[in-house]
Image (cartoon, rainbow, N blue to C red):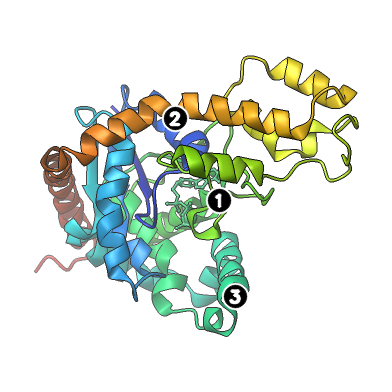
């Protein structure tokens, strides 16, 4: 059985970007692989070190979300990164195998630094060693479990490439020890935000969360970007530039063809179209939210699942660490 490792940062709840961009794929894969699913609190600290309480509450909420979309803890080892100190140890060893200029060239890190500058102005300028180095720690996440496949959204591809480079370098210096992982993308690997931005992201304020209330869903969808050229209700419009149509498509509205045709012919106003999407979205979220409610009321069950996941993850990471120390000749 091949091993899968993937992760998610406890910086907020799951949103549609996670669900359709990555997690829907996890649901399909969970039957056929030895699956490690990491709640990456240490990575989240790299840009949230000043607000650790945010992560503490989000670890629980995120675990609830994962269970509520159908991740089965009997099949998937869900665990928290900081509970596996071997990952931190590996990170230190790998940090010698990466140059600073290579880290700064990582396209995802570059984009995220730019986003921080845009969001926080001057404050965003001060990028920490930990943040620039998070791809190294992510390489440790993957290799600690000998992850062969890493199912992720498109923004993660440069990080996996960087992990592959680290693995090759490690193996060439210390001897064949680690497995080079391969990324695995879903059919929709980059989900756009409500504002039309290329990525829906927790840190970008443009997301529909799986736990959003009816009020929040209404407000967000009513404010979503539509074709700016459509002024009057009966003007024909281009659904391909409309976020409302985009989400109709995403949640597989069975009337999609009608929505598209009417939109192009000017036979449907944006308000009507948004109201229909709100209804469809609420229907889509209902079963997930029912499960969320169950887990919010059964906290111990959630923490027990995380503890069970930790045990399996710990055992595997300890073995990897032994092999790594042996290869590096530091098992004295
Ligand atoms: P943050 O802004 O804190 O980094 P995030 O929304 O980017 O949060 P992550 O925890 O970094 O979420 O990502 C978890 C997984 O979800 C990754 O595999 C990532 O590629 C995927 N993902 C996140 N947002 C999207 C999106 N908009 N489209 C496709 N995949 C996504
Ligand atoms: Mg991210």
What crowding class fits label 2: few (fewer than 14 Cα within 10 Å), some (14-19), or many (20 or more)?
A: some
Name the residue tied to disc 3. Answer: 117
Query: In the image, 252: left or right of 3?
Result: right
Residue at figure coordinates x 43%, y 62% from the top left: 135
Residue 332 or 160: which is nearer the viewer? Answer: 160
Residue at figure coordinates x 60%, y 50% from the top left: 199
Count the marks.
Answer: 3
The location of residue 206, given as percent across then percent down, is: 58, 52
Residue 2 or 291: which is nearer the viewer? Answer: 291
- Please determine whether, in this image, residue 331 is positioned above or below residue 256: below
Q: Is mark 3 on a helix, strand or loop?
A: helix
Q: Hey, which quadrant is residue 32 in on the image?
A: top left
Name the residue tied to disc 2. Answer: 285
**Mark 1 Cβ inside 8 Å of ligand 1:** yes
Q: Which is closer to the viewer, label 1 or label 3?
A: 3
Residue 205 or 111: which is nearer the viewer? Answer: 205
- Please determine whether, in this image, residue 325 is positioned above or below residue 101: above
Residue 68 or 319: which is nearer the viewer? Answer: 68
Reading the chain from its start, which is encountered first: label 3 or label 2? 3
The location of residue 87, given as percent across then percent down, is: 25, 59
Q: Is mark 1 on a helix, strand or loop?
A: helix
């Amino acid at each position: 059985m091949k091993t899968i490792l993937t992760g998610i940062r406890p910086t907020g709840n799951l949103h549609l970007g996670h669900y359709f961009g990555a997690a829907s794929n996890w649901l399909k894969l969970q039957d056929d692989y030895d699956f490690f699913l990491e709640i990456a609190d240490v990575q989240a600290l790299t840009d949230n070190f000043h607000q650790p309480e945010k992560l503490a509450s989000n670890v629980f909420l995120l675990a609830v979300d994962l269970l509520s979309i159908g991740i089965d803890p009997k099949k998937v080892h869900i665990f928290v990164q900081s509970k596996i100190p071997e990952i931190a140890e590996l990170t230190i060893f790998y940090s010698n195998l990466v140059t600073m200029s290579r880290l700064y060239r990582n396209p995802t890190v570059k984009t995220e630094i730019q986003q921080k500058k845009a969001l926080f102005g001057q404050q965003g300028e001060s990028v920490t060693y930990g943040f620039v180095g998070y791809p190294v720690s992510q390489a440790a996440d993957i290799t600690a479990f000998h992850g062969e496949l890493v199912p992720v959204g498109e923004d993660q591809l440069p990080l996996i490439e960087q992990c592959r480079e680290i693995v090759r370098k490690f193996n060439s210096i210390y001897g064949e020890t680690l497995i080079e992982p391969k990324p695995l993308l879903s059919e929709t690997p980059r989900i756009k935000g409500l504002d039309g931005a290329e990525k829906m992201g927790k840190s970008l304020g443009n997301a529909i969360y799986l736990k959003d209330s009816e009020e929040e869903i209404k407000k967000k969808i009513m404010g979503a970007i539509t074709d700016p050229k459509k002024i009057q209700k009966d003007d024909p419009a281009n659904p391909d530039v409309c976020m409302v149509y985009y989400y109709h498509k995403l949640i597989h509205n069975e009337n999609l063809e009608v929505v598209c045709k009417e939109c192009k012919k000017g036979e449907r106003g944006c308000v009507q179209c948004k109201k229909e999407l709100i209804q469809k979205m609420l229907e889509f979220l209902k079963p997930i939210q029912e499960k969320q409610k169950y887990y919010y009321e059964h906290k111990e069950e959630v923490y027990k699942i995380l503890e069970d996941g930790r045990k399996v993850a710990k055992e595997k990471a300890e073995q990897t660490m032994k092999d790594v120390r042996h290869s590096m000749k530091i098992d004295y």
